[in-house]
Image (cartoon, rainbow, N blue to C red):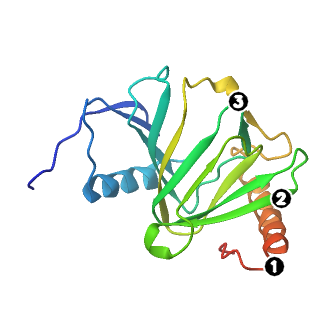
Amino acid sequence: MAGHREIVLREISPEVLVADVPLLTLTSDHIEHLKVRASKNPRRRIRLCAHRNLNDAVHEMLIVMTQECYIRPHKHLGKGESFHIVEGALDVVGFDEVGNVTTVLPLGDYGSGQSFYYRSDELGYHTVIIRSAFVVIHETTRGPFRAADNIVAPWSPDEKDPVAVGEFLARLGRMIEKQTDGASGIPA
């Protein structure tokens, strides 16, 4: 294929790949490959890091998640983030310190007519609810990555407890319905 570059991927884990190239271009074939990998991962997600190491000042990632992916509510200490929806749809859900829904931001790809980009300096506790079979997002945040900068919400269930996660997501769906007067579009 003309203009198609083979990219070299270094696997950090089954969920994290790093593009070891000085010039990165991606095609729809790359996205399809990432979707297959996300579908096979137990946590139903994968990220392709365009930055080359954890200490880089800017972290850019292409993240693919399936609708079954649970992102535990969390917050980032002293870091903002931005999402550009490449494909699919999701809701960014913000919470107060005790777990009440404060913000619901429906996002979809450019062709959806919805907002396709969001940026927040510090949203506080937040999660995403995927509203399409897959969502592909371009996320940018400030580095370096330190696990201690990501704080999980103590009132949210650990992903290793699927029963608690299911109950939490059902409650969250009801809270979002109440917050948005049923306009969310979150799947049941």
Under tag 1, what secondary structure?
Answer: loop
Q: Is 129 left, or right, of 57 in this rendering? A: right
From the viewer's side, name the closer residue of 15 and 130.
Answer: 130
Which image quarter is the N terminus in?
A: bottom left
Q: Could you tell me the amino acid type at mark 2? A: Val
Q: Residues within 10 Å of mark 3 (few under 14, many from 20)?
A: few
| Residue marked by disc 1 | 181
| Residue marked by disc 3 | 78
| Residue marked by disc 2 | 101
Query: Residue 40 placed where, x, y %?
Result: 44, 51
Q: Which residue sits furthest top? A: 55
Q: Could you tell me the amino acid type at mark 3? A: Gly
* Disc number for residue 24: none
- Residue at (72%, 57%) from the top-left corner? 93
**Are dots 3 and 2 in contact, CB under 8 Å?**
no
Under tag 3, what secondary structure?
Answer: loop
Query: Residue 59 placed where, x, y %?
Result: 48, 33
- Residue at (46%, 23%) from the top-left corner? 56
Q: Could you tell me the amino acid type at mark 1? A: Asp
Distance between mark 1 and mark 3 Cα atoms: 32 Å
Q: Quadrant of residue 79?
A: top right
Query: Residue 162 placed where, x, y %?
Result: 71, 53
Q: Is residue 43 visible?
A: no
